[in-house]
Image (spheres, helix red, strand yellow):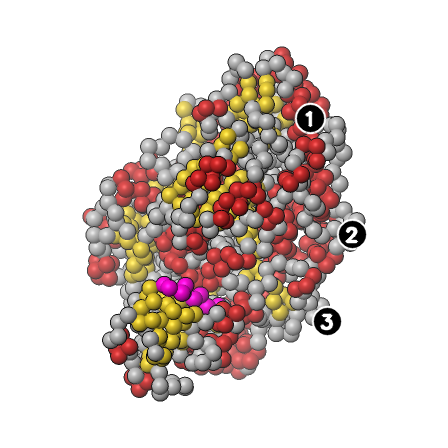
Amino acid sequence: MQIPKELQYTKTHEWARRDGQEVVVGLTSHAQEELRDVVFVELPKVGKMVKQGEPAAVIESVKAAFDIYAPVSGTISKVNEAVVKSPQLVNQDCYGAGWLFAVTSTAPNDFSKLLSPDDYTKQISAAPH
Amino acid sequence: MSAQLIFEKSVSGRRGYLLPPSDVPPCPPADVLPTDALRPSPPPWPEVAEFDVIRHYTRLSQLNFSVDTNFYPLGSCTMKYNPRLNERVAAMPGFAWLHPLQPAAQTQGILELLYELERLLCAITGMGAFTLQPAAGAQGELTGLKIIAAYQRRKRRTRSTILIPDSAHGTNPASAALSGFTVVQLRSGPDGLIDLGELKSKLTKDVAALMLTNPNTLGLFERDIQTIAALLHERDALVYMDGANMNALMGIAKPGEMGVDILQLNLHKTFSTPHGGGGPGAGPVGVAKALEDFLPVPRVRKSGAKFAWESTGRSTIGRVHGFYGNVGVLVRAYTYIRTLGREGLMRASETAIINANYLKVKLQETFPVKYDSSCMHEFVVTLKALKANGVTAMDVAKRLLDYGFYAPTVYFPLIVEEALMIEPTETESRETLDQFAQALISIAHEAKTNPELVRRAPQRMAVDRLDEVKAAREPNLRWTPANDLVHA
Amino acid sequence: MDYAPNTPQQLQEMLRIIGVGSFDELIKSVPEALHRRALPDVPSGLAEAQVIELCEELAARNRSLQETVSFLGAGSYAHLIPTVVDAIASRGEWLTPYTPYQAEASQGTLQAIYEFQTMICELLQMDVANASLYDGASGVGEAAVLALRATERPRILVSEAVHPHAREVIATYLQGAQAVIQQLPTVNGVTDLEALGKAMRDDVACVILQQPNVFGCLEPMAQAGQLAHRSGGLFVASVYPISLGLLQPPGAYGADIAVAEGRCLGSPPALGGPALGLFATTSALLRRMPGRLAGCTVDQAGRRGFTLTLQTREQHIRRERATSNICTNEGWLALRATIFMALLGPQGLKELATLNLEKAHYARERLCTVPWIAPMFDQPFFNEFTLRYEGRKAEAVNKKLAAAGFAGGHPLGEWYPNMAQSSLWCVTERISKSSIDRLVDTLKKI
């Protein structure tokens, strides 16, 4: 189970990486395994305002659709069009080429509220999703 | 060898239907229509002969399971026999060849039929009035929700919450959202029924209505329905009942007497009209007398011996259909009700319940039902015990196809893990039920001794498991010569 | 007569196996107070012959279009139906299957839907079509909902020349949504483009026009589409399938969404239902499409097959976030339409449309030789046109016509109060020249 040490995590299985002013967001390996084949990603519009813990994007498998929640509040600064063209990137490389969107964070404390890799590991081994 | 598409059979110059020649003077389109309004060439439809069409669509039909050929124990779908008498009556020119805008004097027969159908549905369900306009259950739901919203407006309130049990059919929350309501889910109790405590805790001032199904999707009768209705009515909130499971209630209990304010029926379930591979259906909505004013217009009124369409309804929510609803389907349902009559309808529900309980008992050693009590017309088994062998409910559903049975509803309701919802209906014989039980028991055995066989199912159909991921990632929704997927 | 095969003896035996003494033990959960064992207000059942007699008597009290020469259109069009349509569609394998969720057991239905989707796209010249909606009117309603959600703008512009029933359905569908429906006026029987231009702002989600419009007149669709797009709104065209044998289809004039009432493709009028809503969009709007979609794919052995796809838009998965709540649609009518379209082929459709055009133009010309009848609008038309009566009420004229075996044009006063002396006439290929001539003779005597 891949849980990179340099990232932060959410209860809802997103990962977050600080990159200057932006926070890059994606889906964790645990989640993409549960979801199985991703067939479509609905990304937010650039410029959209999002709130920590609220739905920002939607990811679809054949049989289900799941919300992706914003780990931090702010404005969408970038989206990864590549996953719209090739949704399988989310399955193949969820921490790299399968990133979803980036947020210019407006609340600097939000990032520190996220789960550490250890806390996230504990969470997913405790409760089977 | 894949079945060919009709486009692949096209031969330039072939004609399938000849029109009579014109008996009026010629009128070249270019003479009477502006040039830029003219279509340069007609659509590139296939060019095939009549016999090509007969052979193609006849052979295609043979790739289908159907109620006529296979048992469909689909929970909450009531896949009963579709009587051919209904078809004969619906095809009578005096019903099929009527224009919706013909004056009432020319359509007294159909108007009387529709009036009578409304009266019969009231008699069967105990509701005060019906609209026959909604074209399907989901449209009926939308109609019901619009009525709930209109009721709020009349009371000058802005309540925006609808309570829906977590066992509900997907159209329930979809319809609620489409109507501008927020959905709050009710967690079912340990007995599979609505939990009164949970209901009370979520019954806020903002609740406009509760949407429930009775019997619920587990096939269990909500025995506290009168208490539930009273709790809602205390706050002047409404009770909406999804009548998908009406097949369990005819001559047994009437929703109108349970405190239900709005009831939607599915004529293509309980009342035997055919599913047609995905419609047409009809979703009449019954209401308590107090809500009659809100019903869509026009409705059929009787004055003296004459029938007419009437569009006066002080608070009508308006129109949901281009004309009067799926009249052809309504004719079929009327025929069915008159054929069965009061004794036949009661016997239908009785037999549906006996058949379901019989099947449940035949399966109980292999697939116990979570809820101990006897069921109504359907029941839900869980196949989670097979997970140990790597076999899912979907695998079992696919393997049943190899045995010649359409699979029961899988993964629904969402509150039961690896669910299989089974509804035999009254038109299945004991022999068929025995064969089906035997098939399921065999598959359970296969799951233990040869799980791969089950996981690879179906193997006896024209196709085996289809690549649904490919279908979703690379949508191919129409044929063009370039996107042909036939492999040699 | 009932259709439950198990005999009372068999049922008794089954109760014994279940482990109860009587049926009542199975329904213990139904409270005593609610328990009914009679349906006194429902008549007793009947044998087949009695049902036929009863229904034939009811049917005989209707004047069908086989006994009446009908000039009614106004949203419902009676066309020829090839015998082969019923011969195939009445097969149990087409009539009685369930919705094709289990693809392997439904390849017939799924392939037929795929063929239907293809032919509808070709008819409308659009990128993608769904497996049908309830009817044309609800299709217009769904188009409005789609436009509101896709553009996130609150205003819908609808021409007053769109069928009033469709406009009513839009209003019902949009109740509770934060939306404004603004009506566009007509001038001389067609939508006022100047008014449309003025109404186009960046809060407009879509513009909806009908072609031909409710008066039978041809609308300036291309220009209307351009105006809609200039402000970033969507263009919705509500069209008449048979007319597309001669008229430009929506895809040719930039429609984003095309809807139609498709019952005229192979099914009888049946007092307006069941109907067949055709719905097609550009590929950009695919993910927002309501209703079912059949897609082509392959199975494990590489064989071509068909399956429902993009289901995550639909109610059974997305629940409250679905694109629509539609579940059961009009599958059997879509099949009938598919057979119809295959039988007609491109030439057949063009000939059929031409027949309609010719007969309607002949009829209008002859009708206008009646001294008190004149055309209402000076606009090109397909098979429907509006006439103005001098000094005679449309309903009274129709009563006289009914006595002579005709159903006259639909009086428009009910829908358009300022057109109380106008009537909407439709002529399809089913009407003979001699009927038209007899009609004119009858009118001249009124």
Query: Residue C62 in magenta?
Result: no
Which three-letter amino acid code belongs to the residue tagged 1? Tyr
**Chain for numbered disc 2:** B
Crowd band around label 2 with a 10 angstrom C-alpha radius: few (<14), some (14–19), many (20+): few
**Residue at 62%, 58% in the rendered image:** B478
Residue C26 locus on image (x, y percent) = 36, 58
Q: Are marks 3 and 1 on the same chain?
A: no
**Chain for numbered disc 3:** B
**Residue at 28%, 42% in the rendered image:** B153
Which three-letter amino acid code belongs to the residue tagged 3? Ala
Q: Are marks 1 and 2 on the same chain?
A: no
**Residue corresponding to mark 2:** B12
**Residue at 70%, 56% in the rendered image:** B6
**Residue at 61%, 45% in the rendered image:** C249
**Residue corresponding to mark 1:** C362
Q: Nearer the viewer, mark 3 or mark 1?
A: 1
Q: For the residue labelled by badge 1, is the local secondary structure a helix, a strand or a loop?
A: helix
**Residue corresponding to mark 3:** B488
Q: For the residue labelled by badge 3, is the local secondary structure a helix, a strand or a loop?
A: loop
